[in-house]
Amino acid sequence: MEAAIAIPAWRANLATIAALMARAKNELLRVPGAAIPGVLAPTIFFLGLNGVFGALTHLQGFETGAYESFIVPVSMLQGAGFTGAAAGVNLARDIEQGWLDRLLVSPAPRWVLLAGTVLAASARSLIPAAFVFAIALVLGAGWPGVDGLLVTFFMVAAMAAVAACWGSFLALRFKSQSAAPLMQAGMMALILTTTAYAPLALLQGWLQKIARVNPVTQVLEAARQGFVGSVTWAETWPGLLALAGMLTLLGALALRQMRRTAA
Amino acid sequence: MSALATNARVVRALGMRSIRQTFRRPQLIAPIIVFPTVLLAIQTGGAGGAVELPGFPPVQSFLQFMLAGAMMQSLMLAGNSGGIALAVDIEMGFTDRLFSAPIPRFAIVLGRLAGTAALGLFGSLWFLTIGLIFGAEIESGVPGALLAVVLVTSCAMAVGAIGAAIALRTGSASVVQGLFPLVLVVLFLSSAFFPQALMIEPAQTIAKYNPLSFVVEGIREPMISGIDAADTLYAVLAILGIVLAGLILSARALRHRLRVG
């Protein structure tokens, strides 16, 4: 009898993550309509906010004269938030249908199962981001430069990972798709209670206070810098730090909940 | 008991059922109340500086201006939720049981619309309360507040008729749910959130002819300045137009549903 070839643990883990990401990709290819809300919602918000609040740039203290340039990173991050939350809804569906139970009895570590969901959401978030970005360019948003574009898309992908951790935590906590509004609304509130509509100095008192301490403000400012000026390390590192903090916190919560979930 | 009284009881019973259904399911009540409230807070805080823009109508605060927009959003989503709930009833076979009962078919739709109108009423009272708590004044006092409540409630019923027509036509909750983004598009392309004169083209031109703009101005005027007969008349005409369109579409869709089963 031939001896089984031992595969190193790290390779097995990577293969599992890749398989889970491929499953998420297959879902997208087999049900393309499922991706439409994630693309449509941020696009509508972008077009709507631009058409409605475009005149705000006439206020003193605005960094740019083009509201479309100011608002496009918000909509890209919104797309990331919706996509990440959708990953949570899909996980809740997997729990309801018993699919997660089958994964939990496999030898794959819990963190690998979570990583598959989170990384798939990260990759998927680039679709709505690219769509909104293309629409914004057509409408006259400024070109952020290659460095600005890379920073923006990195922030979008990482924000989707944050949203997926949040969605996964709730899915594992409530084990039901009915928690979906909480996943979506939580992300929407987190992204919009920032400098989404106007620069910090122009926000009303209470929102200014929240935006100042909301870590997503730093992420948004980092994603926005190329659209309203030039890319600098001073504007970038606070965003990276905020993302690292949110990923650590929400990732730990989701992982803790995953470990508590018995097969 | 007269036929009219019997029909009224059916409408009341179905209306009460749809209200209970909405309050029991967080996924139905959340879009009607939570979503517009969160957006009202964020837009008021984020774009509040807009009141200093040249051409912005004189208002006490941006919150006072935005209340009508939040009510419109709530009533539109109430109409959409009513459509989703009716489609779920069709999918689950509950509507078939009602069709076989000795009650007029129109009472089934009216029952759902009565429920939607009640949700519109609840939404208008909710946002009036929110406004008053956070310092917004209703310039024309109690009569103005009452006018706003009546317009919101009747418009919720009108929009609900369109939601019901789509539910009856398609019989699919996911199709009606898919209209949610469209609701936002129609709202953004009206003067619900910003003065029409300060909007950017082509949104400005579309908002000028959007019937919802007339309704929202009818609701807003009593709050920010006073009751204006012309604005109220335009709002009433716009609502009547939506009601008429909704009822015609509902009647056709109902016939279609009875034909295909």
Image: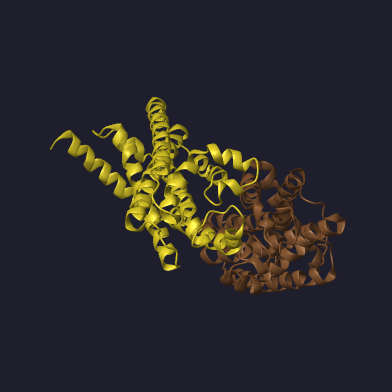
Chain colours: A brown, B yellow
- Where residue B136 sits, quadrant-wise, is bottom left
Of residues B41 and A99, the one drawn nearer to the viewer in this rendering: B41
Q: How many marks are shown on the rendered structure?
A: 0
Q: Position of residue B137 (x, y in %)?
A: 42, 62
Q: Residue at x 80, y 51 (%)?
A: A142
Q: Is residue B6 above or below residue A219?
A: above
Of residues B228 and A144, the one drawn nearer to the viewer in this rendering: B228
Q: Quadrant of the C terminus of chain B?
A: top left
- Where residue B240 sits, quadrant-wise, is top left
Q: Is residue A1 visible?
A: no
The residue sitting at the left extreme is: B1
Q: Quadrant of the N terminus of chain B?
A: top left
**Residue B14 in the figure: left or right of residue A236:** left
**Residue A129 in the figure: left or right of residue B203:** right
Of residues B226 and B100, the one drawn nearer to the viewer in this rendering: B226
Q: Position of residue B85 (x, y in %)?
A: 41, 45
**Residue A69 in the figure: left or right of residue B61:** right
